[in-house]
Amino acid sequence: MDYKLGLIGHPIGHSLSPWIHAQFLDLAGLDGEYKLYEGDHQQLPKVLKHLKQEELDGFNVTVPYKQVIVDFLDEIDEDAKVLGAVNTVVSVNGKWKGYSTDGAGYIRSLTEPFPNLLNKNTSVLLLGAGGAARGIYRALIQQQIGRVDIANRSANKAEQLIASMRLPDIDSQVLSFQEAEEQLANYDLIIQTTSVGMKPHIAKQVISLANLSADAVVSDIVYQPIMTQLLQDASARGAAIHHGHAMLLYQGQLAFEKWTGHTLEINHLVDELEKKLRGENN
Ligand code: ATR
């Protein structure tokens, strides 16, 4: 069968998803296409009607439609419901079901290179409390990680994030950036989810890593540039690093799995995508 897949969002002209899913279709030996369906807010209902008529098997949803898409779905997965955001829609007999694969995709991207990192003794510091942090926080908590604390510029957003998860027995502290810097040595994994350090502001770094443990892993979901200031700093201090583009690949892998039933081995694509990004942007 010819898979009909795609992406809705605005703007999406520079999206890496068509490249990623073309690799996946190829790896799976499947025929199909992954097209961009761009439209502004006013055009969204028309774009979605078009996708229904075209009988897409599934599609991804990106900024700014991850929340509003919910109104157009027939069903929504429990995690996506709690997160209030959908990045993957699966069509079954014309009925649309929404999922969020960001958090689980992030965890897969991390455990592939660091298989023993996450367990009940791991202490994680999450920097940021936006949409990306929500998905990652929820996925971490579901893995029963020892401790997941959040540092954010606005403390109330971090408090709200934790409260909104509706999970019992969460032992998460909210820290200021200054407290996070002071207590940094306590963490095994630091995950940077804010937009700080993203092109064109590449010299910025959200917190100082002066107290970082050399045994820690520092992960930055910013992937433009591939080597953010934070990752350079972490690397210079002897810590292991994890690049943001890997999350993009693995959330895509999970979406592809939902659409086609194929679980692909995609680890080699992490380096390929890195080369592609370095060639285009760095
Ligand atoms: P995303 O969906 O990519 O996570 P978002 O929901 O807009 O984007 O969240 C952006 C995150 O980056 C937030 O944690 C935001 O902090 P606030 O909650 O205090 O706004 C953080 N952020 C953005 N610019 C920042 C800056 N200059 N310094 C520190 N944090 C910043």
Image (tube, rainbow, N blue to C red):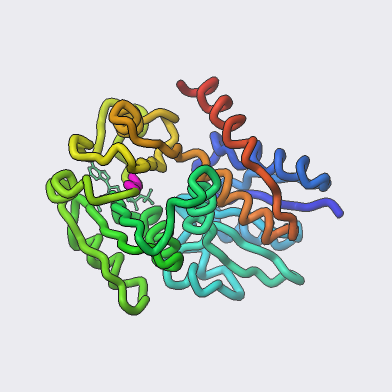
Query: Where residue 55 sits in the image (x, y, percent)?
Result: 76, 60
Q: Nearest the camera: 169 or 114? A: 114
Q: Nearer the viewer, residue 33 or 64?
A: 33
Q: Residue 79 location, x and y as percent?
A: 49, 70
- Quadrant of the rendered structure where residue 138 is? bottom left
Q: In percent of the image, x 52 and y 41: which residue is there?
A: 246
Is residue 176 visible in the rendered image? The answer is yes
Q: Using residue 44 as the reference point, say whether residue 95 is left or right of it.
A: right
Q: Residue at x 68, y 57 (%)?
A: 257
In the image, which residues are magenta? 189-193
48 left or right, relative to 174: right
Task: Locate the C terminus by quadrant.
Answer: top left
**In the picture, residue 26 is in which quadrant?**
top right
Q: Is residue 54 above or below residue 232?
A: below
Position of residue 269 relative to residue 164, above or below, is above
Mainly helix, strand or loop, the magenta region? strand
- Report the residue at 60% width, 49% height from top: 252
